[in-house]
Image: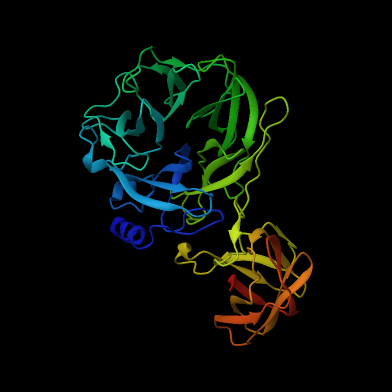
Amino acid sequence: MKHLYYLIALLFPGYLFSQNPIINHCFTADPTARVFEGKVYMYPSHDIVSPVERLKDWFCMEDYHVYSSENLVDWTDHGVILSQENVLWVEPESYSMWAPDCVFKNGKYYFYFPSQPKGQKGFSVGVAVAEHPAGPFFPDPEPIEGISGIDPCVLNDTDGKSYIYWSGKGLYVAQLKDNMRELSTAPVQIKGLPDGFKEGPFAFERDGKYYLTFPWVRKNTETLAYAMSDNPTGPFEFKGIIMDESPTECWTNHHSIVEYKGQWYLFYHHNDYSPHFDKNRSARIDSLFFNADGTICKVHPTLRGVGITDARMKIQIDRYSETSRRGVKIQPVDSDNMFEGWKSCFSSKGAWLKYNNVDFGDKSPEEIKLRVRSVNGGKIGVLSAGRKLAEAEIPADGTWHILTAPVVTPVTGISNLEVSLIAGKDAETDWLEFD
């Protein structure tokens, strides 16, 4: 299976996607986002279908990829940057390359990752170093002494000091030496947080306040929660929930928070491409906002995600912004291959979906293409700002067709789309694009 993922990454190095989940050729869990050199770089863990029996029902991760984007829409997969096979201290078939982080300091990029050491139980945290954010990364021969746990996160403070946070029977913090490879203080367990399982700390600073965010199980599955402090090591005051539990009971969530071009974003994961097995997760993004007092507004997960969609790319309208609810369902195109994505199923006349922020550019398109099908026949209409752009008759043969229709009303700039069933009783739409 891993060879298939690598082949796809080579064939499609600049994979285009603008909706949630953001990467649609492999699994991308625990996404840590950082801004380097004017781009967003995402360092997730990489869930795979387990090649060993002992991990068939558990997390299985053998390597790390890194992805980059300038617009949070078009993502480049830079390939594998580190593998369990090329880190001297890691058990070579442990498949335990869990949630990582990466920071820049002193002219170098430091990639922190947990894994199982050779001949031992539990986890240690290692460091790999590079001259560029996409590598190549060269791992140290030994893990960081004094850390026993998972999910490392590093905060470079405004005074030049650096702190590393991790989880392991609680959340811990310690200061790093300037070499970024050793602890300069003893680990301290972070107090003042609610009872219940906690992991995946992500810390950041904003307007002189320090935020410690973390997945927290308050009932049966993980929320994303946070605490605040005037100091990077605490004491922290618990503030509340950033994101509620998954409505589909995906057990984990894991995240990062980053500011890019004046907007804050929450990177997190969900099991979109593996609905029946929540150990294979995929990265998502949604916008994040703060209240006037610095507290975080709760984020409600969306399918639409973020960014502006180019009208000339395939627009997956099933990743909608708004829906009529009645008469609309979202279903997999192929339930045996979830990476084929989803389709919009309209079952009654007047049912509609809206999709926001489509960029038509300076010149209006002349036609639209739609991949659609219907058993009983129907007619799909596409509107922008209440004006009809196009209509397409769907043959009543139950097979997929790529239909072409003229754009009857000129449209330029950034606009919202509405797609609706204007005749018939059923129709399915996979994607549409303008030309």
Q: Residue furthest front?
A: 362
- Near-viewer residue (135 or 128): 135
- Residue closer to the observer: 254 or 360: 360
Q: Is residue 30 shown left or right of residue 241? A: left
**On the picture, is 39 further left or further right than 387?**
left
> Is 305 placed above or below 85 here?
below
Q: Nearer the viewer, residue 254 or 218?
A: 254
In which image quadrant can residue 102 be found? Answer: top left
User: From the viewer's perspective, is residue 321 above or below residue 183?
Assistant: below
**Rendering coords of residue 136 (x, y %):** 28, 41
The answer to whether one can see residue 198 in this image is yes
**What residue appears at the point 46 percent right and 49 percent down from the top-left corner?**
281
Quarter the C terminus occupies: bottom right
- How has the structure been colored for display? rainbow
Q: Considering the image in quadrants, where does the N terminus appear?
A: bottom left
* Observer able to see residue 170: no
